[in-house]
Image: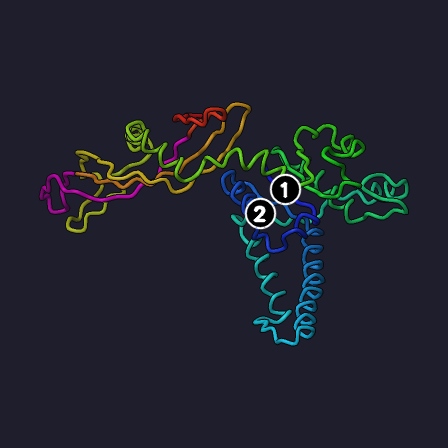
């Protein structure tokens, strides 16, 4: 489930380096989901960081003057600001980055004007609240264009609601209401989602693989016999031969190492986890080279990758191999 954070959530930790954001990023990594950041929020975060930086930087300089001591600030205000922008760019630049910036499209300006004039949520009295209205339109647009659920986290109780989404806003997304999860605090989201999958970590996956090695080896045997042609993968430095002159005697798995994993589905009772495995293989072959000479029982070393699925019981936290 992707997560859209209101600007006020970023205010609490501009650098996104605290425990709460680290918990969020861990959840996103495990589920291969992202923070959705509407362009207006990106601009607000940058603007407010710069303003807050100026205030705090001045406080340090004043404190230094009052105390009569020189405080060695190793970076200038501009350098700190530039480093922050670079960090944001790094976190949003690539398809695999944790944050995705979305541009505003298909916004119903006429509808916003009508809501502003009539002071409908999230507009306030005298039509104030344009930025909040654009954020809300971004939430609606995501729900309309994506099949997946979305979590919207905002500390703006007055305009979006306390604990539950404002009833007028609920009416606007009536057909998508079940897809939107709403929280006022990042903590509440982490308790409901991130903490519940915290046990699915590197150690958990490694133990799962160890306890299912025989079954995984069986899966691999089926895999290489039907889905790949190991003869095309074999490289023998001492023997030059066409693949059709290779006879495979035996394939041995020397090591099974999980490389990545993610929770690709969650139901009431189970988590579904896909795991990428790196297999270290030894292949023994008989070959006939281009000169017609036979070479028997030659070994070759390969690395191959396969995927397996685990079905995890949410209550007992036990896992078993699963096939979709």
Q: What element carries label 1?
A: helix
- Which secondary structure class fits the magenta region best? strand
Left or right: residue 103 versus residue 171 is left
* Residue holding disc 1: 186
Q: How far apart are marks 2 and 1 (CA)?
A: 8 Å
* Nearest to the observer: residue 26 or residue 296: 26
- Could you tell me which residue is drawn at 34 percent across and 33 percent down? 209
Query: Could you say which quadrant of the image residue 190 lies in?
Result: top right
Among the two numbered marks 2 and 1 on one chain, the one whose residue lies closer to the N terminus: 2
Q: Residue at x 64, y 69 (%)?
A: 77
Residue 217 in the image: above or below residue 5: above
* Element under disc 2: helix
Residue at which label 2 appears: 21
**Residue at the (71%, 55%) spot, across then down:** 44
Crowding at mark 2 (Cα within 10 Å: few <14, some 14-19, many 20+): some
User: Residue 211: which quarter of the image?
Assistant: top left
In the rendered structure, the answer to whether residue 302 lies left or right of residue 89 reads: left
Magenta residues, start to end: 285-309
Color style of the picture:
rainbow
């Amino acid at each position: 489930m992707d997560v859209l954070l209101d600007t006020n959530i970023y205010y609490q930790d501009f650098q996104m380096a605290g425990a709460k954001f680290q918990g969020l990023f861990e959840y996103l990594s495990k589920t291969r989901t992202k923070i959705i950041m509407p362009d207006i929020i990106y601009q607000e975060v940058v603007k407010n960081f710069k303003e807050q930086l100026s205030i705090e930087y001045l406080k340090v300089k004043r404190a230094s003057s009052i105390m009569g001591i020189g405080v060695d600030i190793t970076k200038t205000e501009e350098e700190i600001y530039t480093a922050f922008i670079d960090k944001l760019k790094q976190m949003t630049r690539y398809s695999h980055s944790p944050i995705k910036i979305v541009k505003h499209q298909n916004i119903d300006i006429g509808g916003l004007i009508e809501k502003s004039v009539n002071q409908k949520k999230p507009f306030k009295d005298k039509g104030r609240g344009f930025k909040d209205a654009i954020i809300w339109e971004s939430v609606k647009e995501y729900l309309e264009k994506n099949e997946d659920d979305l979590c919207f986290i905002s500390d703006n109780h007055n305009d979006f609601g306390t604990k539950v989404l404002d009833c007028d806003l609920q009416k606007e997304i009536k057909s998508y209401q079940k897809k939107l999860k709403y929280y006022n605090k990042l903590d509440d989201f982490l308790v409901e989602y991130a903490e519940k999958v915290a046990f699915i970590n590197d150690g958990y996956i490694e133990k799962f693989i160890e306890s299912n090695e025989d079954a995984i080896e069986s899966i691999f045997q089926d895999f290489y016999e039907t889905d790949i042609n190991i003869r095309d993968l074999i490289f023998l430095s001492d023997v030059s031969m066409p693949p059709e002159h290779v006879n495979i005697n035996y394939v041995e798995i020397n090591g099974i190492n999980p490389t990545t994993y993610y929770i690709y589905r969650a139901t009431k009772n189970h988590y579904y986890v896909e795991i990428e495995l790196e297999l270290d293989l030894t292949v023994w072959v008989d070959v006939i080279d281009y000169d017609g000479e036979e070479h028997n029982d030659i070994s070759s070393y390969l690395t191959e990758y396969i995927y397996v699925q685990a079905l995890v019981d949410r209550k007992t936290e036990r896992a078993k191999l699963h096939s979709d």
